[in-house]
Amino acid sequence: MSRPTIAGVARAAGVSVASVSRVLNGLPATEEMVERVQRAVQELGYVPDARARSLKVGRTFQLTLAVADVGNPVYVTMMRAVEEVVSAAGYRLVVTTTGPDVVDEVALVRGMARGYADGLLISPIRVDEDLVKSIRECEVPVVVAGNVPAKAGVDTVRANSPKGMLLAVDHLVAQGRTRIAFLNGPADTVPGAARAKGFAEALKAHDLQPAALAEATDFTFAAGRATAPELLGGGFDAVICANDLLAVGLMHELAAAGLEVPKDVAVVGMDDSELAEQCFPTLTSVNLGSAERGRRAAELLLARIEDNERTPRRIVVQPSLSIRRSTP
């Protein structure tokens, strides 16, 4: 059996091919025409040819979201928000993992020249001159969910990690916790550097010194568990972790060492991911607006696709603190 065509739909509906095209592309049409075309589409089992549509309008109607680790709950939250925005605009979202190496981020950006997507939303964990150059020269519109230098000339949406860290320290100090340690991820990453700087500034604002510092090899649960022993015995009464995965890994090791959260040690995470509600005790965490960042970045990308001459925007999403049982 031959595949149903748009001409066949037009004959079955008793309208012109142009009218069918208008309805299928969501253009203004009478209610009667829409009903007739949709009925014919269902009866014939017609499926629009996406390849032909792409060739006709010069677009793939596909966008790429690139993150460091699709298994990280914060990226899952961001992905859902991005997908909601772009699907409403008629685009499919393809999600890919860059991993922790900047060379892979650069390769992905340069690979956009192959034309398999109309735009790229990337959340780079590491940034260097090669990445900035590749973003600036990319053949499709790019929006960065993160922080890159202004010279990259692209729209960016980033979190305010230093303010988020201050919210965490303010909360702990208000609860009488002043011997505060910090478990960071790799300090040579964008989030690692921002959160280390924010922690130092927040302690300084309270005239405090860090009780202990440790740097994990990654922003993962396993890395949190592996690095936690470096903190034990540090004489702290609270720990702030650079993300929720590190925080939950730390809490496992605190329990193994016979320390109770929050009685002996208060723990604060960052990202306020679904994991914060799922662990025990539930985790106090800094909400860095991952969903909002995803939404705003997706909107900027769609706007950039429509008008690539727009002046780049640099948006900062403000944080909040979600207080749960891991702190008093």
Image (spheres, grey):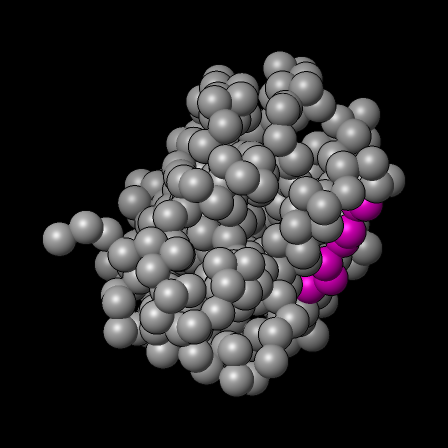
Q: Is residue 144 left or right of residue 125?
A: right
Q: Magenta stretch: residue 317 in it?
A: yes
Residue 186 location, x and y as percent? Answer: 50, 33
Residue lying at the far left of the rendered structure: 1
Residue lying at the far right of the rendered structure: 311
Residue 288 location, x and y as percent? Answer: 62, 60
Residue lying at the far bottom of the rendered structure: 32
Q: Nearer the viewer, residue 318 or 20?
A: 20
Q: Magenta stretch: residue 102 in it?
A: no
Q: Is residue 158 visible?
A: no
Q: Nearer the viewer, residue 108 or 38?
A: 38
Q: What residue do we see at 46% from left, 82% from top?
A: 35
Q: Is residue 101 left or right of residue 57?
A: left
Picture quarter containing residue 25? bottom right
Residue 313 location, x and y as percent? Answer: 81, 45
Picture quarter containing residue 45? bottom left
Q: Is residue 196 above or below residue 77?
A: above
Q: Is residue 39 visible?
A: yes
Residue 70 location, x and y as percent? Answer: 38, 47
Which contiguous range is marked in magenta? Answer: 313-319
Q: Nearer the viewer, residue 227 or 265?
A: 227
Q: Is residue 6 above or below residue 112?
A: below
Picture quarter containing residue 252? bottom left
Q: Is residue 198 above or below residue 320?
A: above
Q: Is residue 94 left or right of residue 127?
A: left
Q: Is residue 286 above or below residue 49?
A: below
Q: What residue do we see at 57% from left, 36% from top?
A: 58
Q: What residue do we see at 35% from left, 41% from top?
A: 223
Q: What residue do we see at 30% from left, 45% from top?
A: 222
